[in-house]
Image: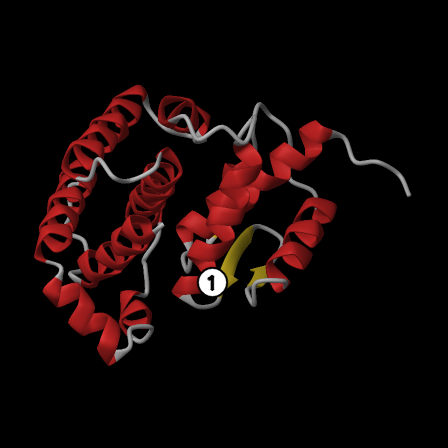
Amino acid sequence: MVAVDSNIIQFRNLLALKILSSAPNKVVIKSLEVDQKQVTSDDLSVIGDMLIAVDLVLDYSVDAVRINGSETNIRRAMRMLLQDFQASNSSEVSQLVNEYPDLTKANQEMLLRLATQIKNELPELTNYSVSYLLTELYILLRRYSLGAPATHQLGQIFTSEQLALIQSSEKLFVLSQSLIKKISEVIGAPLSEIEIYYLTLKIWLGVQD
């Protein structure tokens, strides 16, 4: 078996992340070029095979590409890819934020401020849990900036017990509201209210660790 160059792997991961972030919108293939490196049919074939593993379909033509699949699977794939961008398994928050691709300095600083807010309000959270929540916020930033999230699908994942749990966790719910509001302000558009419930559940799970 021929080893694949690490630069090619990183390039394909970056392509996949951009396409996932933009779903279900079409992305012009020419716009995916990085440092004049062209996207090949081999690149798209490998990305397509990778996405099949998370029940997503890569649909592409000569000049454009898009992803078909559920919102939960899109975010699942984004989380998997973001793990590959990390230089190490460190849970250090500042290092994690620096390794997020295509993130402006201003948005890096914004995420670090949100990390501080989370730590101050929930000091019992581990660095791993805070890092996980920051990744969720980064995904929100990308999905709402570049794509069109199918948030009605997120509402379908909650059981009645989970909804009752979220509604009874006032402190976590208020924190989620604050975090979502700040992401919304950066994007310049409102996020679906279901994102507050989704993030509250993620925070609750982190508190349980």
Q: Residue at point 22% right, 33% down?
A: 119
Outermost residue to the bottom:
160
The colour scheme used here is secondary structure
Q: Nearer the viewer, residue 11 or 125?
A: 125
Find residue 162 and report its horizontal and vertical position in percent: 25, 71
Q: Residue at point 79% right, 36% down?
A: 4
How many discs mark residues in the rendered view?
1
Q: Identify the residue position indicated by label 1 in the image.
A: 73
Q: Is residue 28 visible?
A: no
Q: Quadrant of the N terminus?
A: top right
Left or right: residue 127 versus residue 69 is left
Mark 1 surroundings: few (<14), some (14-19) or many (≥20) residues within 10 A: some
Find residue 66 and report its horizontal and vertical position in percent: 50, 57
Q: Nearer the viewer, residue 19 or 53?
A: 53
Q: Residue at point 26% right, 55% down?
A: 204
Q: Is residue 149 visible?
A: yes
Find residue 164 and report its horizontal and vertical position in percent: 16, 73
Q: What secondary structure is marked by label 1?
A: helix
The disc labelled 1 sits on which kind of residue? Asn
Looking at the image, residue 27 lies above or below residue 161: above
Q: Residue at point 40% right, 38% down?
A: 128
Left or right: residue 106 versus residue 170 is right
